[in-house]
Amino acid sequence: MAKVKNGKLHRKDGVWDPLKSSSTDRDQAEVIPKTAQSASPSYRLAFVDTDFLCREELRPVRLQLELLKTEMVLTERGIKSTVVMFGGARIPAPGMPAWAAKNDVQKTNLEAASVYYDEARKFARLCAEEAAKYDHREYVVVTGGGPGVMEAGNRGASEVGAPSIGLNILLPHEQAPNEYVTPDLSFNFHYFAIRKMHFLMRAKAVVIFPGGFGTLDELFECVTLIQTKRMARIPVVLFGEKFWHSIINFQGLADFGTIAPEDMELLHFAETAERAWDIVASFYEPDTV
């Protein structure tokens, strides 16, 4: 916001700006006399008129705003790289009931999968300990900000005093921000596409725990970008090799010819947090961050 000093306007960051700021006009517009004219929706400043911003024609602007807001906050915080953790929102913490189970089979499966909650929590602590070496600007944990594996990731980071990011999205259920996300790094999205861009824009590694359609979408988005060289190769680590081979026949894709045999090398498997971190760490050694 600009401020007046010696009759001249300056931005708060010290950069000279002779133009009146939009925030000043926004505040002024709130206290002008209320008349039929000033109360009309047409009189609202366009950039504070939420009805206008939500019009169908403004979709390109909303896409840009969602991209810019998170990018600007992360840049201002000095966050240079992240470790992305994907996984099921329905996987409970050990000893907790499977809140989304619809029958006894699902209940048994999901509660047995709580081991992945523990491993996600441990893995996030390992990332956070590494991030501390770089003043929490590198290897910062980022999750979808919701429950399950996402909560475990943010929780593990918070337990060692590290900040972590949550990229939430408005869904009919299960996606309220978990309490372990660093509050000023908790973001909310309308567009899945922009949210997925932010997951990968700073990613130095992606680790993926068992999950559903959303987790699969995130896995294949990432692998496709690496396979097609639309992003740099980074470690992609799948937790629970038995689970992944039971739902996706990766080798079958290679045998059929729809992926190249070397594409199989884009994926790593791990059963423990320590093994997953070894994969990430060895990928970047002896390089420095």
Image: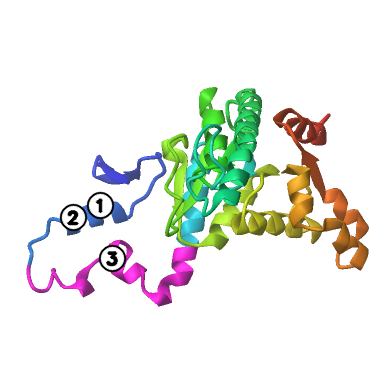
Amino acid type assigned to the residue bearing label 3 in the image: Asp
Q: Residues within 10 Å of mark 1 (few under 14, many from 20)?
A: few
Residue 288 appears in the rendering? no
Magenta residues span 35-63
Q: Which residue is mark 3?
A: 49
Whether 12 is drawn above or below 118: the answer is below
Dot 3 or dot 2: first in sequence order is 2
Q: Which residue is mark 2?
A: 28
Q: Quadrant of residue 249?
A: bottom right
- Judging from the image, the colouring scheme is rainbow
Kindly indicate whether the residue at mark 2 contacts the one at mark 3 (C-beta within 8 angstroms). Answer: no
Amino acid type assigned to the residue bearing label 1 in the image: Thr
Viewer-nearest residue: 194 or 149: 149
**Helix or strand or loop: what does disc 3 sit on?**
loop
What separation in Å lies between label 3 and label 2 (alpha carbons)? 15 Å
Viewer-nearest residue: 155 or 43: 155
Marks 3, 1: nearer the viewer: 3
Please state the horizontal and vertical placement of residue 203, each as a whole percent of the image: 66, 44
Q: Residue furthest bottom?
A: 57
Please state the horizontal and vertical placement of residue 79, each as a whole percent of the image: 57, 37
Whether 254 is drawn above or below 180: the answer is below
In this picture, residue 133 sits left or right of residue 176:
right
In this picture, residue 5 sits left or right of residue 37:
right
Kindly indicate whether the residue at mark 1 contacts the one at mark 2 (C-beta within 8 angstroms). Answer: yes
Q: Which residue is mark 1?
A: 24
What separation in Å lies between label 2 and label 1 (alpha carbons)? 6 Å
Dot 3 or dot 1: first in sequence order is 1
Q: Quadrant of residue 109?
A: top right
**Helix or strand or loop: what does disc 1 sit on?**
helix
